Image (cartoon, grey):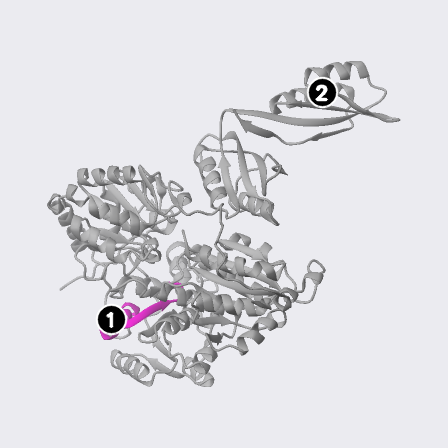
Amino acid sequence: MQITGAQMVIEAFIAEGVDTVFGYPGGAIMNVYDAIYKQNSFAHILNRHEQASIHAAEGYAKASGKVGVAMITSGPGFTNAVTGLADAYMDSVPLVVVSGQVPMSLIGTDGFQEIDAVGISRPCTKHNYLVTDAADLPRVLKEAFYIARSGRPGPVHVDIPKDVTAQIAEFDYDVELDLETYKPHTKGNPRQIKKAMEAIAKAKRPLFYLGGGIINAKATYEVRDLIHKTGIPAVETLMARGVLSFDDDLLISMLGMHGSYAANMAMSETDLVIGLGVRFDDRVTGKLSEFAKNADVIHVDIDPASISKLVNADFPIVGDVKNVVNEMLEQCEYVNPDNYESWRETISNFDELHPLTFHEDTDRLKPQWVVKRVGELLGDSANISTDVGQHQMWAAQFYPFTRPNQWITSGGLGTMGFGFPAAIGVKAACPEKVSINFTGDGSILMNVQELMTAVEKKIPVINIILNNNFLGMVRQWQTLFYDKRHSETDLSVQPDFVKLSEAFGGIGYRVTTKEEFDFALKDAVEKNIVAFIEVIVERFENVMPMVPSGGSLFNMMLLEKKETK
Amino acid sequence: MTENSERRVVSVIVVNEASVLSRITNLFSGRGYNITSLTVAPIPESKYSRLTIVTSGSVRVIEQITKQLHKLIPVLRVYEHADLVEKEMAMVKFPITENLSDINTLCEAYNGKIVNVGDNVVIAMVTDEPKRIDNFLAVIKRYNPKEIVRSGAVALER
């Protein structure tokens, strides 16, 4: 059929089963928005800033396991979106982002709202396209979706000049993809897998090191199976929260900079690391030369470049985690869970020595209590998004996660302002779950305009603002490493968060006690409109334990023990 | 970071399309890899181009370079061989008043000759292994070269 480039974008979205598009119109993308106006197949959610559109699409993708879609205009529309693209790239989030561009005749002339978009997005996307002929659009869009979701997922950016969206050409989406140069390696080498299983059988203190790649590969239940069949304990990265249920006996906890004592000690004492969908991020490993020093390493990942990038893999296995774990499950008879009895005991002793906990305070609410309480009240029925900072770490440490895709956070890039728009995308993907955003008094102001989006589209995100009147994580570092010089981190001058939410048409609560908090959360869930719950918490609470940047995992700063009478 | 850095030649076969070269060079600059020289030209009767990149780094860095290059969507193949036939071309402009027969004899020793004669200058061209080109350029200093251009290396595995 002969249609315009703009209509092709719509038809491609329909063919890909897209049900929600996040975006913001503007001059160069107007033809496509005109085509959106004329269709009824998918919803469009108008965010109030392009960065928020991308984060919302990320939230949608992370919660649903599908490709997130966003649409923006040229120039400033695109540059606003760059942070979101970079965030999605770092966390391997499958996105297709379509941007308008000035007409072809104006490209290179410094035209109004012109910027070299593909030049800017190149280092922060998995791939990108500048489409110069509408006849290429069906192929490019189909490739974009395929590349975004296959292999190691990531954002794909498609830049379309305005005249190309007006150009009429043949649209046939049934074209066979011919990507001779892109063939992700999904099946692990059987010989390597066999060797890895033999190494597991021989190990005395093996340890599963679980990463976000498991969630991307939709391999959670296979991985749970493998762990239960082998009886080998596991640690999770920040991105892997929910792979194991919080109450699983074999889950130690999160590891890394703010990992638990037991998790970090287990990693330091293990003789065989079994890394699944991980990338040995510096926030996980601490000082590389001391990381899992006495261990051999099995590393399963879809991205060959992740393997032996930072830590040498003795058993490298390139492949889709789901495929590889299924293969491993078939060779489980090698492994006797009883062999690891004393190792499991060692780990529970670590945990008894320094459990992941916090000290209650009778005067002020503790931020950790708030997280735990939300877990008690909502548990599995909520999806949890976060911004970036102390609240993010407390949420990761103390929320009782039960399933994959429940936890939506900005890990690699660490983007403040991620949480609220992401939680909007999460709610759009999973309307039956409560969408919580744990945030701080710093982060929430970085995309606070999304109150308008949530009110307009009736998306009842509950933002729990753990307010300590500080840019808390930076303040913590200043306290610990900069001799308490709290440079520009005191956020005592603040808006009235209750009125702020109300000004947009949302609901607001300011709570200082446990009773008030319980009431606010229950009321917000019941009222089912976007909410701010501002919780006044202890100002100087630190996230503990902590491995100082560049330190070894076994050298943690620990929560001070309280004298018992 | 104390690992030994060594010179390596990496050949990359890429789809000959817009902006593919900047994808490659962006990758090198963004990840802090070196480019000593880079040559690129289309492969005859195909939709591909071949790049020859001379780089340096530790074994781990070189391995990362090849893996990261391969991750780029338009990259078909990456070769990183030690056993190569490697050639480079250089052209040098000399004043016509210099000893041209000496220059020509030297050029012959490096598979070259004087290829152009003007009113005031001559241009000599040589083709040889990059290390020998270094030698040649050191030797001809005494003939007051006015301008030197090197092509960068091209290579084929044996």
Residue type highlighted by circle 1? Gly
The quarter of the picture where residue A308 lies is: top left
Between A270 and A349, the residue placed more toward the observer is A270
Q: Is residue A216 above or below residue A168?
A: above
Between A14 and A357, the residue placed more toward the observer is A14
Q: Residues within 10 Å of mark 2 (few under 14, many from 20)?
A: some
Element type at mark 2: loop
Element type at mark 1: helix
Name the chain letter of the residue that bears numbered label 2: B
Q: Residue at x 57, y 35 (%)?
A: B53
Coordinates of residue B114 in the picture (x, y in percent):
78, 21
The quarter of the picture where residue B96 lies is: top right
Residue B38 inside the magenta-drawn segment: no
**Which residue does the numbered mark 2 point to in the structure image?**
B112
Between B67 and A207, the residue placed more toward the observer is B67
Residue A377 inside the magenta-drawn segment: yes
Bounds of the magenta segment: A366-389
Coordinates of residue A288 in the picture (x, y in percent):
36, 42
**Which residue does the numbered mark 1 point to in the structure image?**
A379
Total marks shown come to 2
Q: Residue at x 51, y 45 (%)?
A: B31
Mark toward the viewer: 2 or 1: 2
Coordinates of residue A88 in the picture (x, y in percent):
45, 59
Residue A69 visible? The answer is yes
